[in-house]
Image (cartoon, grey):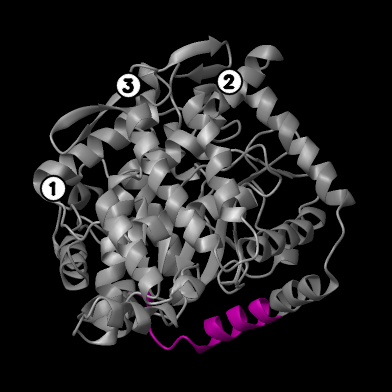
């Protein structure tokens, strides 16, 4: 890995490509639960003042009616993405009344599964499909794990980078095939070192006792209201989070060798029936419980910490979009909400992720075999549950390696990449971000997860009390923050447009929902 990065950095320099070695576009998707004034998950409708959750480009919902999702457009810099995300927050807060946004990944107080309303999207076939898909997730995995929140970062390289890089590598494939190959190499390398993200930025070492999931039986008691794991970094990414628990049992493991094989794996899972899901039923007493009884209802059900993405047209399958137009960007899904930031993520984190992204692009070409896949899965689990254990060793190419030693190896190369990215920028912001988070390697107490537990301990607070105090602080922050008039106007116009578009969509449906689903799944990749 490190030799490949060193060689590729020399190639970048030889062909004078430093000016294009940066992120082309960056976008953020941030999930946050709405809570009532008592810190319980909200049971109210998605506010009309926020527009249509089905059609609004910036404000939607994820699994639950209470689980807001803020989506920035693809922007040129991390600073612009953070600024836009902040403006969405500023628009939302005055429009949710006395409710608040929960600023952490693990949920607020839940009063059982019945307290979690599945998101609703109106009466159109498309809206019903989104709702039924979520019903299916509830039947398959339970509702509780579906209200865990996260940050997704969408990144791409600049368009001008690719032809120069292809020429430098003397690659003879078609331009789109080359881009696809490079992005899949990047994804494989992100999986190899992906454990680094929860180690540094994991911020879910504890959970409120109302989070009733079978995985919590292994957690320790912090106080009468809180469960935790002593060395955990990200319970969200661990056994109690949203993962495909049965993927080895039912053979749904995605292949990241190349785009066709990746699509083929997901397609097989969408088309293959699974007996336990058949027992749930698809239509029961005239009501849909799930979209189908197959291993996956749709592609998005396959959980992964990183995904190749292409913007899909309305009613177009994500896999079809990938096959038709190739990989447009990569979605990194492993960040917990940062409770120390009113945005849920900091600009310094985003810069670090950008460096990691380029690091993985310049890394090893090799494929992931079965043995390495097992190592990747084990490392991810160990860091999520035991990442701050000073004795933790991970697995690397069949051997045991101390986590701290592996971190130091990675950071040495990250610093070289950051220096190259900073070369033509007139500043050293990327180097600063790498150096900033290296402190978490030198001292595990600097990691987000350690800081959360330390703050809870020092202030004698439960998980709920600590996170609620931050939530109230950020409510005040946004009430005093300056608004960008142009962005606020854009979001307001999108509210009106989205409500109108939803009505038009509902009025123009010319098929029954059953016919709509049959047509959707009949489309072949």
Q: Is residue 180 above or below residue 175?
A: above
In this rendered view, identify the residue nearer to me: 230 or 479: 230
First to last magenta residue range: 497-514
**Where residue 67 appears, x then y in whole percent?**
57, 50
Type of secondary structure dominating the magenta stretch: helix
Q: Is residue 257 left or right of residue 59?
A: left
Q: Nearer the viewer, mark 3 or mark 1?
A: 3
Split into 4 quadrants, where in the image is the C terminus? bottom left
Q: Nearer the viewer, mark 2 or mark 1?
A: 2
Sequence order check, earlier mark of 2 and 1 = 1
In this rendered view, identify the residue nearer to me: 352 or 480: 352
Q: Is residue 491 above or below residue 197?
A: below
Mark 1 packing: few (<14 Cα in 10 Å), some, or many (20+)?
few
Sequence order check, earlier mark of 3 and 1 = 1
**Where residue 311 appears, x then y in whole percent?**
43, 77
Specify whether residue 64 is in view.
no
The residue under label 3 is 392
**Where residue 187 appears, x then y in whole percent?**
31, 59
Sequence order check, earlier mark of 2 and 3 = 3
Kindly indicate the quadrant of the structure image that contains residue 77.
bottom right
Question: How many badges with numbers are in the image?
Answer: 3
Q: Is 383 within the magenta?
A: no
Q: Residue at x 31, y 75 (%)?
A: 517
Tag 2 secondary structure: helix
The residue under label 2 is 453
Specify whether residue 431 is in view.
yes
Q: Is residue 47 left or right of residue 139?
A: right
Mark 3 packing: few (<14 Cα in 10 Å), some, or many (20+)?
some
The residue under label 1 is 250
Q: Residue at x 23, y 56 (%)?
A: 364
Q: Residue at x 13, y 47 (%)?
A: 250
Distance between mark 2 and mark 1 Cα atoms: 37 Å
């Amino acid at each position: 890995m490190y030799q490949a990065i060193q060689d590729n950095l020399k190639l970048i320099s030889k062909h004078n490509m430093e000016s294009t070695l940066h992120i082309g576009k960056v976008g953020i998707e941030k999930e946050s639960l709405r809570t009532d004034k008592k810190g319980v998950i909200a049971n109210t409708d998605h506010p009309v003042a926020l527009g249509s959750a089905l059609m609004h480009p910036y404000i939607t919902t994820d699994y639950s009616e209470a689980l807001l999702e803020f989506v920035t457009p693809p922007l040129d810099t991390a600073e612009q993405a953070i600024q836009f995300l902040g403006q969405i927050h500023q628009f939302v807060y005055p429009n949710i009344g006395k409710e608040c946004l929960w600023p952490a990944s693990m949920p607020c107080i839940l009063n059982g599964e019945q307290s979690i309303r599945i998101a609703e999207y109106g009466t159109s076939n498309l809206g019903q499909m989104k709702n039924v898909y979520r019903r299916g997730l509830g039947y398959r995995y339970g509702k509780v794990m579906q209200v865990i929140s996260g940050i997704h970062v969408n990144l791409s390289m600049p368009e001008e980078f690719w032809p120069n890089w292809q020429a430098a590598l003397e690659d003879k494939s078609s331009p789109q095939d080359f881009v696809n190959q490079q992005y899949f190499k990047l994804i494989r390398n992100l999986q190899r070192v992906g454990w680094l993200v929860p180690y540094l930025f994991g911020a879910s070492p504890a959970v409120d006792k109302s989070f009733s999931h079978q995985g919590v039986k292994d957690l320790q008691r912090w106080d009468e209201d809180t469960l935790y794991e002593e060395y955990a970094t990200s319970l969200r990414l661990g056994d109690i989070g949203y993962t495909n628990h049965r993927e080895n049992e039912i053979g749904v493991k995605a292949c990241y060798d190349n785009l066709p094989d990746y699509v083929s794996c997901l397609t097989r899972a969408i088309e293959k029936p699974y007996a336990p899901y058949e027992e749930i039923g698809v239509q029961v007493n005239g009501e849909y419980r799930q979209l189908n009884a197959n291993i996956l209802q749709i592609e998005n059900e396959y959980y992964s910490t990183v995904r190749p993405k292409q913007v899909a047209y309305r009613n177009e399958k994500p896999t079809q979009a990938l096959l038709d137009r190739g990989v447009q960007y990569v979605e990194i899904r492993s960040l917990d909400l940062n409770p120390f930031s009113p945005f849920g993520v900091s600009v310094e984190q985003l810069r670090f992720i950008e460096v990691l992204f380029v690091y993985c692009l310049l890394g090893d070409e090799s494929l992931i075999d079965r043995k390495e896949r097992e190592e990747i899965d084990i490392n991810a689990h160990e860091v999520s549950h035991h990442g701050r254990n000073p004795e933790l060793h991970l697995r690397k190419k069949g051997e045991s390696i101390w986590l701290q030693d592996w971190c130091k190896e990675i950071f040495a190369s990250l610093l070289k990449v950051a220096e190259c990215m900073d070369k033509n920028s007139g500043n050293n912001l990327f180097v600063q971000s790498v150096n900033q988070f290296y402190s978490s390697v030198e001292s595990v107490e600097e990691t987000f997860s350690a800081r959360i537990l330390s703050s809870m301990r020092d202030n004698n607070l439960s998980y709920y009390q600590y996170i609620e105090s931050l939530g109230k602080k950020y409510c005040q922050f946004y009430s005093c923050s300056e608004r960008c008039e142009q962005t606020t106007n854009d979001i307001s116009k999108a509210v009106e447009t989205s409500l109108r578009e939803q009505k038009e969509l509902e009025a123009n449906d010319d098929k029954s929902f059953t016919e709509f689903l049959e047509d959707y799944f009949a489309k072949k990749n």
